[in-house]
Amino acid sequence: MRKRFVTTLIVCLAALFAAFCFAACQSGSTDVAGKTYVFESLDVEFTSEVPEEVKNEYEGNKGLMSSMYANMSLSFNEDGTFSLDVGVPNAPLQKGKYTQDGNKVTIKTDEDLANSVLSATAECEVDGKKCVLKMDLGANAGANAGDNLKGITIAITLKEKA
């Protein structure tokens, strides 16, 4: 009977320790302050309203877009500001402020850059050492783009810089 109690106690303590370690790892892994993320991959997501020919065009250009953004880096500063270098020659450095709520990070560019490379507001989802930056082209493309970008989202996966 005593052996069963000791075994049960050890298993419970081990489970409690594992849960504590998991929680500690999770809470630290999503904080982006002071971290820099670099390009890993790019994907394009579509809603059902996007015509097939537009989907095919974007799918066919994923390799080109990936090579274009291969040098992209996103840095989150301790003071709540960020800088994004899209890695494209002559493109302006994007700067602004970010807020974080759990694993969701919202970045907002400074007003004077809102119509340049990065949309005015974008969302990141942090998962461990990866950050997925999603840009809804239709929502943030500006007045000149019209409706031809509705339903298209660029998802760029960035990995934490070592």
Image (spheres, rainbow, N blue to C red):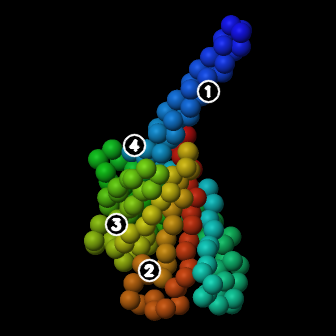
Identify the mark nearer the N-term, 1 or 3: 1
Disc 3 marks a residue whose amino acid type is: Thr
User: In the rendered image, which quarter is residue 120 located in?
Assistant: bottom left
In terms of depth relative to the viewer, which is nearer, 111 or 93? 111
From what the image shows, is residue 87 above or below residue 45? Answer: above
In terms of depth relative to the viewer, which is nearer, 17 or 119? 17
Please name which of the two marks, 1 or 3, marks the residue nearer to the observer.
Answer: 1
Task: State the residue position of label 2.
Answer: 139
Q: Earlier in the sequence, mark 3 or mark 4?
A: 4
SS at mark 4 in the image: loop
Residue in the image at 55% along x and 40% along y: 162
Residue 57: tell me if it is visible: no
Q: Nearer the viewer, mark 4 or mark 2?
A: 2
Task: Answer left or right for 17 relative to 59.
Answer: left
The residue where tag 3 is placed is: 109
Q: Secondary structure at mark 1?
A: helix
Alpha-carbon distance for marks 4 and 2?
29 Å
Q: CA distance from mark 3 to mark 2?
A: 15 Å
| Residue 1, above or below 129 | above
Between discs 4 and 1, the one toward the N terminus: 1
Q: Is residue 128 above or below residue 48?
A: above
Q: Earlier in the sequence, mark 3 or mark 2?
A: 3
The kind of residue tagged 2 is Ala
Task: Name the residue that disc number 4 marks.
Answer: 34
Quadrant where the N terminus is found in the figure: top right
- Three-letter amino acid code at disc 1? Ala
